[in-house]
């Protein structure tokens, strides 16, 4: 059997960036990916873009996006819970990543229709994240990286601040390898509903997982149990409101619903619970994951009328449709009279709607209603009426391995000689809450490359 | 139209419309994303814009075993073939050849037989060269209708197509745009210019684009050869045979070589590709069609080479038999795609203008 210098655990963006970088420095690398080939690439296969600093036009990106602007955008969403040094390192390095990605097979495309606001800040992968992952696997293969699919890592033996061996199962058998260095890039733990339930309470049973079912935090838990330094809290996760009919796992981008700002949202008791028009949807969709999680049965129901049906990106599932609110309520399995009452109360609180503007904060608000709707408040009057159900969709978790600027892991007694971490599994080291679109791939690419470089330097 | 095929393509198109990750690959996606709901005509139009490069299959996070079971290249390929069959005229011939390679071979044998019989029964009226085997007038009597009837048939089919996809009056700008795109086969390079995912899973390559270009330009050169010969015959009173350094022969020899090689290349590529990402039912028909086209080119070259030998009359019958079959089957085989694709590009040019 080949002796490997480096074992990379995981098969997503961070793992591949680490593996390619290490192989380019001459190390013999093995990727252990727990998913079968058809599902390789973790959450990375669901992504669409990468947020990139640039001091001039770069690839598909127009104008400029400075380090400071990028960092301020990040601070706004994390409310200060940010490790500035690591965050700035990721931001600064992102600029050189884009050409590096192209050199390794990634192709970009102009900002997608419906996402024009991101054309300056986010570089979109042509074909999305799975095509990025495919390109990286091709390049890694050319560089001599070996890949084992359906290889689930179960344990890293840690003693004297070094990883002594790696255990994994493959084709029903257990294996043990002793690479010189290890890179952990196996994501968060969001696919382990039991773990989520321990952290969140029973509500988590009803959460949907937007990405891969394979990120179950097995390696993360194994390392934390052995005293590897941790960051973040287990009850912090990035969760958005998605179509309630989405599959339990891997529903990905198409389950997103952009209709909330033009709607009212009620819970299963047919009562409104939050200002649907607080801000433009991209800035609010993340809080709705938590809002819905706090409602009975963790479900929300969106109600719109025919005036608004064409104002948002279509979702993958057709809306429920009915000629009366009572009929719509029946389809939603909620109380019809109550819904009618809620809608009527809302409608009477609506005022002048002549300033309605779907893509801007238009100030068209309700008066005397609690909770208020502060923008896009138009009465829901024109049949047919449409409905969607909302559930909490978890994107990723924040609890992770604490790393330094070299992506190296440590324990209380100092750095672990031969262990590095990259991607979602260490993203908590940089941001403790909140999320900025496209930053996940930035972290994975930047720290994947650092981890690969450092691991190879150690192993060679 | 088979509603189940359209419905399946529509189901997938709605998923793509909520995703949009493949927007940059080809013309299908911008056209798709311009709609919220898809009529049967919209789906037909999308299907004819797709050239089965498979980029969107290998890039898709929702392919089987995922429950969304995306396979847009296959879904569109099936609708596409069904649309050609549904629009074809006369209908009794419509569903014979796309899915039945054996039917093409049978038609070819019949084509040979007809020409052998013609040579035997009509023969020469004392002409030179090939006309020593079959008189010029006899050739014209056979091939003028064999050329014009399929064109008329295609015209009927295209009219039906144009009606269903909601086409409007065509302007010069639509045509220049559409022909420009067809000439470069721009879409076959994919939005990033790296080509198709065809012969080796998700690896991008220009292979398919290049062999397809060889086939198209080879065919057009052969066609130009025949056309110049016709003009020389009728306008300048210069009947065949022509020397090697004449326009018809130069065009024909070069075109024949390119066409033959292109068809061989296409067959080799197709054999390496995954049939389930195309119209699996039409696999045999497509292969037989490419082989027939290649054979037209090859037999033409053989005829050039051996035109002065005693094998000439037999070779002539074989070549002309293949040409006859090819022409007559044009509306009912893969050959129709060239016309529908152009129509789809013109329609798409109307959408964006
Ligand atoms: C629907 C969706 C859309 C997103 N869109 C974007 C976007 O557009 N831009 C952006 O920047 N971010 C986006 N994100 C976030 C982004 O996906 C992550 O930040 C990023 O993919 C993390 O990369 P990673 O390599 O760390 O983890 P992953 O890509 O999840 O890879 C983890 C890998 O580890 C493997 N693994 C897990 N456990 C084991 C084990 N025990 N043994 C072996 N292997 C194991 C998994 O199979 C997987 O291959 C999105 C997330 C989701 C869910
Ligand atoms: S083929 Fe798949 S990845 Fe591409 S747009 Fe459609 S759903 Fe999205
Ligand atoms: S197969 Fe190619 S041409 Fe057809 S829709 Fe997909 S990307 Fe476009």
Image (cartoon, coloured by chain):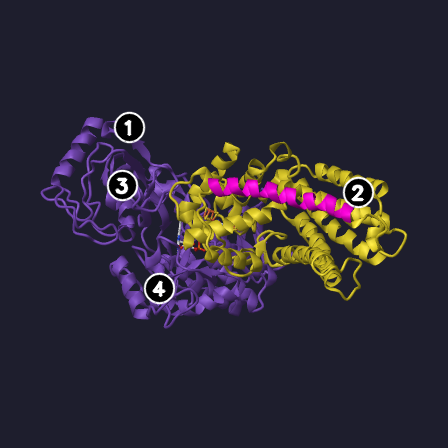
Please rate how many residues cluster around mark 1, counting C-alpha atoms within 10 Å: few if below 14, some from 14 to 19, many from 20.
few
Determine the chain carrying the residue at label 1: A
Boundaries of the magenta span: B137-164
Which marked residue is nearer to the observer: mark 4 or mark 3? Answer: 4
Residue B100 vs residue B221, the one in the foreground = B221
x and y percentages locating residue A379 in the rendered image: 18, 39
Residue of label 4 = A120
- Tell me which numbered mark, 1 or 3, is placed earlier along the sequence: 3
Residue of label 1 = A333
Give the drawing colour for chain B: yellow
Looking at the image, which residue is at 37% across and 43% down?
B36
Q: Is label 4 on the same chain as label 1?
A: yes
Residue B171 in magenta stretch? no
Residue of label 3 = A292
Label 2 SS: helix
Which residue sits furthest left? Answer: A368
Residue of label 2 = B115
Give the drawing colour for chain A: purple
Q: Distance between the residues labelled 1 and 3?
A: 17 Å
Please rate how many residues cluster around mark 3, counting C-alpha atoms within 10 Å: few if below 14, some from 14 to 19, many from 20.
many
Which marked residue is nearer to the observer: mark 3 or mark 2? Answer: 2
Please rate how many residues cluster around mark 4, counting C-alpha atoms within 10 Å: few if below 14, some from 14 to 19, many from 20.
many
């Amino acid at each position: 059997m080949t002796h490997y210098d480096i074992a990379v655990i995981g098969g997503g963006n961070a793992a591949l960036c680490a593996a390619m970088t290490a192989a380019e420095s001459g190390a013999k690398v093995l990727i252990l990916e727990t998913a079968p080939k058809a599902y390789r690439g973790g959450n990375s296969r669901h992504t669409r873009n990468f947020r990139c600093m640039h001091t001039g036009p770069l690839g598909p990106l127009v104008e400029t996006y400075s380090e400071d602007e990028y960092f301020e955008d990040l601070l706004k969403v994390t409310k200060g819970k940010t490790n500035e040094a690591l965050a700035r390192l990721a931001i600064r390095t992102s600029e050189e990543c884009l050409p590096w990605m192209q050199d390794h097979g990634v192709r970009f495309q102009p900002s997608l229709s419906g996402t024009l606001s991101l054309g300056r800040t986010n570089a979109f992968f042509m074909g999305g994240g799975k095509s990025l992952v495919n390109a990286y696997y091709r390049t890694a293969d050319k560089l001599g990286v070996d890949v084992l699919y359906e290889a689930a890592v179960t344990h890293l033996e840690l003693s004297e601040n070094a990883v002594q061996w790696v255990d994994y199962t493959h084709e029903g058998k257990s294996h043990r390898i002793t690479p010189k260095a290890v890179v952990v890039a196996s994501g968060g733990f969001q696919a382990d509903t039991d773990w989520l339930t321990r952290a969140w309470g029973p509500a988590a049973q009803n959460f949907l997982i937007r990405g891969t079912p394979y990120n179950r935090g097995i390696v993360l838990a194994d390392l934390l149990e052995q005293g590897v330094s941790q960051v973040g809290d287990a009850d912090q996760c990035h969760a958005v409101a998605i179509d309630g009919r989405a599959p339990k796992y891997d529903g990905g981008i198409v389950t997103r619903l952009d209709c909330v700002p033009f709607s009212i949202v009620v819970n299963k008791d047919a009562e409104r619970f939050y200002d649907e028009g607080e801000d433009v949807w991209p800035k609010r969709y993340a809080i709705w994951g938590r809002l819905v999680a706090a409602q009975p049965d963790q479900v929300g129901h969106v109600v719109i009328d025919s005036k608004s049906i064409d104002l948002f990106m279509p979702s993958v599932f057709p809306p429920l449709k009915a000629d009366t609110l009572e009929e719509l309520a029946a389809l939603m399995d909620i109380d019809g009279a109550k819904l009618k009452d809620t809608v009527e109360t809302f409608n009477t609180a609506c005022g002048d709607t002549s300033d309605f503007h779907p893509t801007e904060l238009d100030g068209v608000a309700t008066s005397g209603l609690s909770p208020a709707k502060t923008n896009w408040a138009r009465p829901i009057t024109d049949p047919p009426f449409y409905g969607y159900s909302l559930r909490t969709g978890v994107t990723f978790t924040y609890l992770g391995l604490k790393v330094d600027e070299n992506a190296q892991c440590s324990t209380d007694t100092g750095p672990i000689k031969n262990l590095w971490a990259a991607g979602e599994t260490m993203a908590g080291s940089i941001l403790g809450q909140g999320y900025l679109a496209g930053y996940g791939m930035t972290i994975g690419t930047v720290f994947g490359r650092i981890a690969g470089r450092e691991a190879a330097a150690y192993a060679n | 139209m088979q509603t189940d095929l359209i419905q399946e393509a529509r189901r997938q198109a709605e998923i793509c419309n909520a995703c949009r990750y493949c927007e940059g690959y080809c013309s299908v996606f911008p056209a798709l994303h311009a709609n919220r709901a898809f009529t049967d005509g919209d789906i037909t139009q999308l299907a004819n814009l797709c050239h089965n490069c498979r980029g969107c299959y290998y890039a898709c996070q929702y392919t089987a075993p995922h429950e969304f079971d995306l396979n847009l290249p296959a879904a569109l390929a099936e609708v596409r073939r069904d649309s050609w069959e549904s629009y074809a005229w006369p209908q009794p011939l419509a569903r014979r050849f796309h899915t039945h390679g054996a039917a093409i071979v049978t038609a070819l044998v019949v084509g040979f037989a007809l020409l052998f019989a013609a040579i035997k029964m009509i023969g020469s009226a004392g002409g030179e060269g090939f006309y020593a085997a079959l008189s010029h007038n006899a050739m014209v009597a056979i091939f003028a209708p064999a050329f014009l009837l399929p064109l008329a048939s295609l015209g009927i089919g295209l009219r039906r197509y144009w009606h269903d996809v909601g086409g409007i009056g065509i302007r010069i700008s639509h045509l220049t745009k559409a022909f420009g795109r067809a000439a470069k086969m721009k879409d076959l390079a994919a939005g990033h210019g790296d080509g198709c995912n065809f012969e080796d899973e998700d690896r991008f390559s220009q292979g398919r684009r290049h062999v397809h270009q060889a086939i198209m330009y080879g065919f057009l050169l052969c066609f130009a050869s025949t056309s110049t010969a016709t003009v020389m015959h009728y306008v300048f009173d210069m009947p065949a045979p022509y020397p090697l350094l004449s326009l018809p022969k130069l065009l024909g020899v070069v075109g024949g070589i390119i066409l033959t090689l292109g068809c061989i290349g296409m067959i080799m590529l197709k054999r390496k590709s995954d049939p389930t990402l195309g119209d699996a039912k039409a696999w045999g028909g497509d292969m037989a069609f490419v082989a027939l086209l290649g054979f037209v080119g090859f037999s033409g070259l053989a005829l050039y080479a051996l035109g002065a030998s005693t094998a000439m009359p037999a070779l002539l019958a074989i070549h002309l038999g293949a040409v006859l079959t090819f022409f007559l089957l044009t509306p009912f085989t893969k050959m129709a795609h060239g016309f529908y694709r152009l129509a789809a590009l013109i329609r798409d040019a109307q959408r964006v203008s």
